[in-house]
Image (cartoon, rainbow, N blue to C red):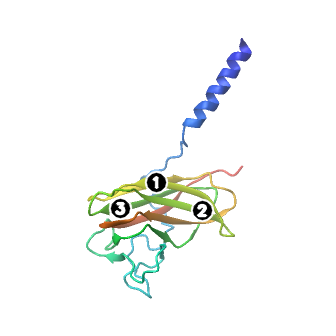
């Protein structure tokens, strides 16, 4: 009987672990007075080669079109004086930050604010990608968000990273929407915790 109880208890623990997510949770208040690791997080600085694009960010798409549906916008913003705007995009887009150094023992709080002219039919995704020194992606954390006419914030808590990671990027997936405008602003990644090495 005792053995049966132990087996059942072990089974319940195993089953419970399948349904319980990570208890890792960082808050924006944890990021106060911490440096933002993302370059040009509020899109205040234009690219030197194209003043319509923000510096330190790359737009990835599967199109050969010379005109991209992205521009800096000084009429809509959460912080600073600019946001970045995507207008009537005819294909899925990926908006990726320049890389920044991270420590695999760190815990990170990631944020990004979005709004749209009309409610989004498909969700955007804010992602934290962690890479090793060779450029292989080792960890991915993601949060889906459907923007509306008011600014909405997506947040991610990331930690317990692979020992090999040395740098990261923020990637924002914008789904195809030919009759809508989406704005992004106030992107951030902050190391808010230091895990003890084992």
Quadrant of the image for the N terminus? Answer: top right
- Residue where numbered disc 1 is placed: 143
Residue plotted at (64% across, 56% down): 105
Instruction: Estimate the x, y position of residue 143 in percent, counting from the top left.
Output: 46, 54
Circle 3 residue: 114
Q: What element carries label 3?
A: strand
* Distance of label 1 from label 2 (alpha carbons): 15 Å
Would you call the spot at circle 1 few (<14 residues within 10 Å), some (14-19), or many (20 or more)? Answer: some
Q: In this view, does 23 lie to the left or right of 149?
A: right
User: Is label 2 in a helix, a strand or a loop?
Assistant: strand
The mark nearer the N terminus, 1 or 2, is 2
Name which quarter of the figure residue 69 lies in. bottom left
Q: Residues within 10 Å of mark 2 (few under 14, many from 20)?
A: many
Q: Where is residue 149 in the image (x, y as percent from the top left)?
A: 26, 59
For residue 41, above or below residue 27: below
The answer to whether marks 3 and 1 mark residues whose Cβ atoms lie closer than 8 Å is no
Q: 38 or 175, which is in the foreground?
A: 175
Residue lying at 41% horizontally and 55% vertically, measured from the top left:
154
- Horizontal placement of 84 versus 20: left or right? left
Of circles 1 and 2, the one toward us is 1
Q: Decide if residue 89 is on the left or right side of residue 159.
A: left
Of label 3 and label 1, which has the lower sequence position? Answer: 3
Q: Residue at x 44, y 88 (%)?
A: 49
């Amino acid at each position: 009987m005792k053995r049966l109880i132990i087996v059942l208890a072990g089974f319940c623990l195993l089953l419970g672990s399948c349904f319980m997510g990570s208890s890792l949770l960082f808050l924006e208040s944890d990021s106060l007075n911490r440096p933002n690791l993302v370059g040009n997080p509020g899109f205040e600085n234009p690219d030197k080669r194209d003043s319509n694009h923000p510096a330190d960010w790359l737009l990835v798409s599967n199109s050969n079109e010379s005109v991209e549906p992205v521009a800096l916008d000084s009429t809509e913003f959460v912080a600073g004086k600019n946001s970045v705007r995507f207008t009537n995009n005819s294909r899925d887009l990926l908006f990726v930050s320049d890389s920044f150094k991270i420590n695999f023992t760190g815990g990170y709080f990631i944020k990004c604010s979005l709004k749209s002219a009309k409610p989004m039919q498909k969700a955007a995704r804010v992602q934290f990608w962690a890479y090793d020194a060779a450029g292989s992606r080792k960890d991915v954390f993601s949060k889906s968000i459907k923007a509306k006419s008011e600014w909405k914030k997506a947040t991610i808590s990331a930690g317990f990273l692979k020992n090999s990671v040395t740098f990261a990027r923020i990637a924002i997936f914008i789904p195809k929407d030919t009759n809508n405008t989406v704005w992004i602003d106030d992107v951030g990644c902050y190391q808010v915790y230091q895990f003890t090495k084992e």
